[in-house]
Image (tube, rainbow, N blue to C red):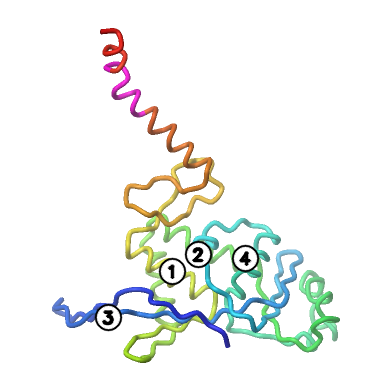
Amino acid sequence: MGYMSTSFVSVEMITQGGTLLASSNLKCRFELLKPKAVASAGGQLVIVPGSEPVTPRLVHVELANLRDDDKTAARFLWAHGPLLVEEKYRLSNTGAQGYLVGPVAEAINPLLETYPNADFYLHTRELLMERSWLLRHAWDGNRNAVSTLEQYLDSATGLHFQKGSICITARSAWTVAVIMFLYDYSRNRIARCENPDCPAPYFIRKRNTQKFCEAGPCADYGARQRAKRWWKEFGNDWRKGRKA
């Protein structure tokens, strides 16, 4: 299985009394594979996994900003693979034999000719939006949501030692999204764009004072807001100086 391994975050070993014992680097190994196919119909999404490794992008940012429609959900799965990988099915045992009907069958049947015996994962758009909703609440500072993500990570990742490093293995896009979010959250890099019209307001800020994402319209909006504040605070003095 393909994976990407990268140095990720500093790990500190601390006793209950708060004494720092050691500090090291934690490496995350992301075992995500690009799908062979993704099909959608009526809120049902079918993912046929492939074997080509996926280099994770900002999974948590894209999931938090996910729009509630089949096309956007399918595009997310194309980029990152299945959100969850707990349950896998076999195409030849489902649509071809009429076990599934409605939107699920509508999504599966076109895949049968090309991938008759392939395994697949079945997601609903509702599942993606539920996870997106949880990320957004955590992004907005909801401690219960952050705690839920932390508890999930405790049970969903494999921890092992490799060549002097501590490694966490993540096999699903959701696990990668949770790891990336908690890492950026711990660094105080999680932010929400203050442009009220921003279509993707959840972003990773590069400095603590950054209030707007780097999309062109939002950067322009921020510049206009700063100019308004300057004129409000210093405009009269500047005009008086011009007249003097």
Answer with the quarter of the image where residue 180 lies.
bottom left
Q: Earlier in the sequence, mark 2 or mark 4?
A: 2
Residue topped by disc 1: 180
Q: Which residue is mark 2?
A: 58
- Quadrant of the snapshot with the C terminus: top left
Direction from residue 206 to residue 243 in the image, left or right:
left
Determine the CA span between mark 3 and mark 4: 33 Å
Quadrant for the N terminus in the image: bottom right
Which stretch appears magenta? Answer: 229-237
Q: Count of labels shown? A: 4
The reply, left or right, for residue 4 in relation to residue 106 is left
Q: Residue at x 49, y 69 (%)?
A: 177
Mark 2 / mark 1, whichever is N-terminal:
2
N-terminal-most mark, 3 or 4: 3
Mark 4, residue position: 76
Q: Nearer the viewer, mark 2 or mark 4?
A: 2
Contact (CB < 8 A) between labels 4 and 1? no
Q: CA distance from mark 1 to mark 3?
A: 18 Å
Which is closer to the viewer, label 3 or label 4? 3
Q: Secondary structure at mark 3?
A: strand
In the rendered view, does 21 fall on the left or right side of 8? left
In this rendering, the label closer to the viewer, 1 or 3: 3
Q: Main secondary structure of the magenta part?
A: helix
Lower position in the chain sequence, tag 4 or tag 1: 4
